[in-house]
Image (spheres, rainbow, N blue to C red):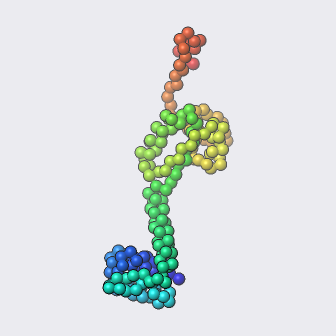
Amino acid sequence: MLTLRQIEVIRAIMVTGTVAGAAKLLHVSAPGLSRLMKHTETSLGLRLFDRRNGRFVPTAQAGGIFEQVNTVFQKVEDLRDVIGRLETGASQELRIGSVPSIANVMVPRAIERVRHRHPDLTIDINTLKIEEAIDYLLLGKGEVVAISSRFDHPSLTFEPLASGELYCIVPEGHALAGLETI
């Protein structure tokens, strides 16, 4: 069985072609790396590299191992990336639902303020019918829903997103045209 360190060393030698190059890439000493490589080949019972003109060239029988080493190394890099994103908050996602009536003006303004505070946050926006809002939240499809009217529900909390004025436009002579407030 190979350790992650052995996999890292094998890949470094594959990439650089020399023990000295691999040692420089990994920021370690070449003699220690050479000893580890000899130990690895001995414990596996096969030669991974042929030495030609001072270069390490993969042996034909080690081809399958190198494919797997690259796959494992890529997965370790993916893990490092995920951990780095967790540390910065970049892997967090905020799922927002909104009814169409406010999805184009009020929600983008609110998202702009959130983005200013959390630039790496992934935001997923979904347009919902008002009837879908409760299920969206209670079934865990999203964390927030922006709707244009308030109603009572024992499992939900309502907070104002914004305030403003609405205007009613009617033709001249309409019954509502003479009213100051509707």
* Whether residue 127 can be seen here: yes
* In this picture, residue 74 sits left or right of residue 129: left
Name the residue located 40 percent from the left edge and 86 percent from the top edge.
50
- Residue 94 drawn above or below residue 25: above
Q: Is residue 71 above or below residue 46?
A: above
| Residue 37 image-quadrant placement | bottom left
Q: Position of residue 28 (x, y in %)?
A: 35, 79
Q: Would you identify the image quadrant in which residue 170 lies?
A: top right
Q: Nearer the viewer, residue 36 or 14?
A: 14
Picture residue at 33% right of the left edge, 78% below the top: 21
Q: Give the answer, above or below, for where 157 lies relative to 77.
A: above
Residue 108: image x %, image y %?
Answer: 48, 39
Q: Position of residue 146 (x, y in %)?
A: 56, 38
Q: Left of 78 or right of it: where is 19?
A: left
Between 47 and 37, the residue placed more toward the observer is: 47
Q: Is residue 27 above or below residue 151?
A: below
Residue 144, by quadrant, is top right
Q: Residue furthest front?
A: 60
Q: Residue 23: in sight, yes or no? A: no
Q: How many marks?
A: 0
The C terminus: image quadrant: top right
Q: Residue at 50% of width from left, 87% of height from top? A: 44
Q: How far across and down, in percent of the image, does residue 14 sit?
A: 40, 77
